[in-house]
Amino acid sequence: MTRLSTSANARRVSQTPEMRATAVSRASITSPRAWPFDGPRTVLAPMEGITHPDFRHVMTRLGGLGLVCTEFVRITASPMGKRQVARTVVRSEGAPLSVQVMGNDADRMAEAAELVEEAGASVVDINLGCPMPRIVRKGVGAAMLKDLALLERVLLQMRRHTRGLLSAKIRAGFDDSSQVVETAKLIQDCGVDYIAVHPRRRCDFYKGVADWPIIRLLKEQLQIPVIGNGDVWYATDALRMRRETGCDAVMIGRPALRNPWIFAQIAALESDEPPIHPTGLQLFQFIEALIRHYETVYEGRKTGLVGPLKEMLTWHARAIPNGRPRISALLRLETVDSILAGAYELLAPIPADGLDLDAQGSLGLEQCGSAVLQEAPALSQSA
Ligand SMILES: Cc1cc2nc3c(=O)[nH]c(=O)nc-3n(C[C@H](O)[C@H](O)[C@H](O)COP(=O)(O)O)c2cc1C
């Protein structure tokens, strides 16, 4: 990993927290910053209940990943305990780790940032995008996009206590996206090192298609690196997102659950090698290996794995034509072994071209984003 070597960062690293507390205030950045990591410009998105250390480990081993993110850690009135820090800050070999925190108490957030950084996080990330009612009711996640004064206080305090990389993950807005540039500039001026944007508003939840022109707008307006996120369903779309928006890296969440090879496919495309086009048997073998890996971690408590297994199958079904009804019988089974047996029967006979898992998305089962609006329908099928 290469740390940023701007004078602002060099200054931060050599100062004590007390010195930084007086030195840090909103300051405009005048020269563009470089993407801070070597390696692929790809990021596994934070996903609650999914991107725990075991999933991150399996995904990193498939290759092509430049940065992995934890799910959010909710920071409330009490400090993070040692066990919670240890459970969260688990690095996977081969990729730096971004640890995401969510909260609105400036002191507690700064303290959490310090703790996870000391425990070995490569980046401390703040969640400014979670749309869930139980989260926004508490004034955190996407709700913080509505209160820029509070956001500024929290970010400045986190900046004072974080020596290394600090990032923010935003949505385009809460009810509308008219303030997205102002919000992103405030985040930049608070000393955040890079920003990830999922260009939907909170009120959209996951409806419609991600608004990639917003990524391009932020890339044009900001000096810090911008990660583009949202509806990169096929490997070719990651390259297209970078081309159309100029973003510095591409973050992928749900599409990686549907197609775990997407990062490896992007890496292959970038090095002019043929990307893997998995068969149904390979997909089954991935699912089985993931579950067997979880079994060793959970010490054989197979019943606890029925839920995660069904969740994974539901994502994979999106890559099978008419997939949802075809897996519905599996979702009624109650043991890991019976579900795996059913999954084998369903998946093993499917040839590669019967699955929408190739790098181009030849079957076009998903709708991808576009920053070139008039070309969106054609691109989503074939680009
Ligand atoms: C099940 C699930 C859990 C998520 N949890 C988080 C989270 O903990 N923190 C966060 O910033 N975003 C979270 N997200 C949002 C994703 O990181 C990502 O921004 C969103 O899914 C859009 O990207 P995609 O189209 O690549 O999936 C979650 C998304 C899903 C589907």
Image: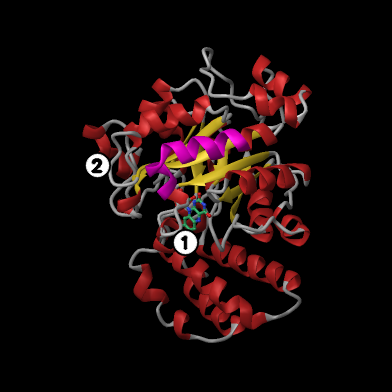
State if disc 1 and disc 2 touch (CB < 8 Å): no
Q: Residue 163: image x %, image y %?
A: 71, 31
Q: Residues within 10 Å of mark 1 (few under 14, many from 20)?
A: some
Q: Which mark is residue 351?
A: 1
In primary-sequence order, the first of circles 2 and 1 is: 1
* Separation of marks 2 and 1 at Cα, in angstroms: 27 Å
Position in image of residue 357 (x %, y %):
46, 53
**Is residue 350 shown above or below 246?**
below
Identify which residue is drawn at 54% across, 43% down: 265
Q: Is residue 144 left or right of residue 15?
A: left
Query: Is any part of residue 65 visible from this angle?
Result: no
Question: Would residue 144 be visible to someone looking at this image?
Answer: yes
Identify which residue is drawn at 33% across, 68% down.
322
Which of the numbered marks, if any, corresponds to residue 377? Answer: 2
* Span colored in magenta: 143-157
Residue at left offset 50%, top offset 69%: 311
Mark 2 element type? helix
Residue shown at 41% from the left, 44% from the top: 230
Label 2 CA crowd tier, 10 Å (few <14, some 14–19, many 20+): some
Say what amino acid the circle numbered 2 marks. Answer: Pro
Q: Is residue 155 magenta?
A: yes
Q: Main secondary structure of the magenta part?
A: helix
Residue 223 % position (x, y): 49, 20
Q: Is residue 103 left or right of residue 332?
A: right
